[in-house]
């Protein structure tokens, strides 16, 4: 069975990278346990997220929610420059209030059916200004720099969410997405606890098994079975992180048996749920 790599654990509240690469080749589909913001600065690049593909322009802002399967696609060898920000879900929740939800921009991307935000004038925006201050202070050995970085990051999240609700922006439409596959992906994510066998999904959408399996693989690059496993593992991990007993998390994530969950978990994360939970707690994630 084809597998998809889970890229990294986040033991800090956030991480920021300013990167320039060429000749990266083909990047595998992968996912994270944390949110990701990508600011695309240059490159002939598309971004594929959950079966949707977006052609990026300079200064586009890409939102990738925790657990979403994604990858960049490079159309030539031109330099791929971007700022990447990894964000802990718990950290955002800690500083969010009922009327000031710092994860709004991620939810809004899903509700808008687009993961890419395009500002009319990014370089003159307050978002760009806060990003510039963040990157300028990366790695500085100055008094209270860690505290300053946290303050600047929170300012960035405030400005990013203000931009997300502004009339001066637009969420760009996908350049390519098979409507039937998009419906199937949405259905899977809304029914992870239920029967998601190939036969059940094919029956729900009046498709043959062969057509469903091959169309899903052709359009997304991964098998429907593996996609479902990844999504169930992500749900189980979020329940475990929230304090639910591991066996209950497995059951509430749609795994038929605990042994099935354990095999899939070890294959993906490289350790048992109990060991990983202990490791995370010791690092105050």
Image (cartoon, grey):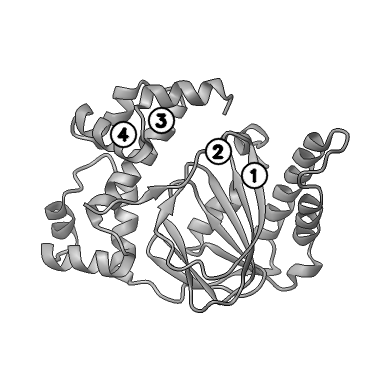
Would you name the residue on which mark 1 appears? Answer: 15
Q: Position of residue 54 (x, y in %)?
A: 49, 71
Circle 4 sits on which residue?
266
Kindly report the distance in space between the C-alpha atoms of the residues bearing marks 4 and 2.
Answer: 18 Å
Of the two numbered discs 3 and 1 on the same chain, state the one appearing first in sequence.
1
Tell me if residue 262 comes above or below residue 152 in the rendering.
above
- Mark 1 secondary-structure assignment: strand
Residue 35 spot, x, y in % from top left: 54, 47
Q: Earlier in the sequence, mark 1 or mark 4?
A: 1
Question: What is the spatial separation of the Cα atoms under label 2 and label 3, in whole angstroms?
Answer: 17 Å
Q: Earlier in the sequence, mark 3 or mark 4?
A: 3
Going from the N terminus, do you reach mark 2 or mark 3 first? 2
Q: Which of pointers 2 and 3 indicates the residue nearer the eye?
A: 2
Q: Quadrant of the C terminus?
A: top right
Residue 278, image x and y in percent?
Answer: 46, 20
Are discs 3 and 4 less than 8 Å apart at CB?
no
Marks 1 & 4, CB-CB < 8 Å contact:
no
For label 2, the SS is loop
Residue on which disc 3 sits: 239
Q: Tell which tag, 3 or 1, sits nearer the viewer.
A: 1
Q: Residues within 10 Å of mark 2 (few under 14, many from 20)?
A: some
Residue at label 2?
Answer: 10
């Amino acid at each position: 069975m084809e597998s998809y790599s889970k890229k990294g654990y986040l033991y800090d509240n956030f991480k920021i990278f300013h990167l320039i690469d060429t000749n990266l080749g083909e990047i595998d589909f992968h996912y994270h346990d944390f949110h990701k913001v990508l600011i695309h600065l240059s490159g002939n690049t598309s971004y594929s997220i959950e079966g949707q593909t977006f052609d990026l322009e300079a200064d586009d802002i890409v939102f990738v929610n925790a657990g979403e399967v994604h990858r960049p696609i490079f159309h030539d060898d031109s330099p791929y420059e971007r700022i990447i920000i990894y964000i802990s879900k718990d950290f955002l929740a800690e500083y969010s209030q009922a009327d000031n939800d710092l994860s709004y921009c991620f939810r809004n991307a899903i509700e808008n059916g687009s993961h890419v935000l395009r500002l009319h004038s990014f370089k003159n925006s307050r978002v760009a200004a806060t990003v510039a201050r963040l990157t300028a202070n990366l790695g500085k050995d100055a008094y209270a720099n860690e505290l300053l970085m946290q303050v600047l990051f929170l300012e960035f999240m405030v400005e990013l969410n203000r931009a997300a609700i502004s009339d001066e922006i637009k969420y760009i439409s996908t350049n390519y997405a098979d409507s039937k596959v998009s419906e199937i992906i949405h259905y899977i994510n809304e029914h992870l606890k239920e029967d998601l066998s190939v036969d059940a999904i094919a029956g729900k959408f009046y498709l043959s098994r062969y057509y469903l399996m091959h169309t899903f693989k052709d359009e997304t690059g991964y098998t429907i079975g593996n996609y479902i496993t990844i999504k169930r593992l992500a749900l189980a991990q979020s329940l475990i992180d929230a304090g639910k007993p591991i066996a209950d998390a497995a059951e509430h994530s749609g795994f038929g048996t605990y042994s099935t969950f354990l095999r899939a978990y070890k294959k993906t994360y490289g350790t048992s749920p109990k060991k990983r939970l202990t490791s995370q707690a010791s690092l105050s994630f």
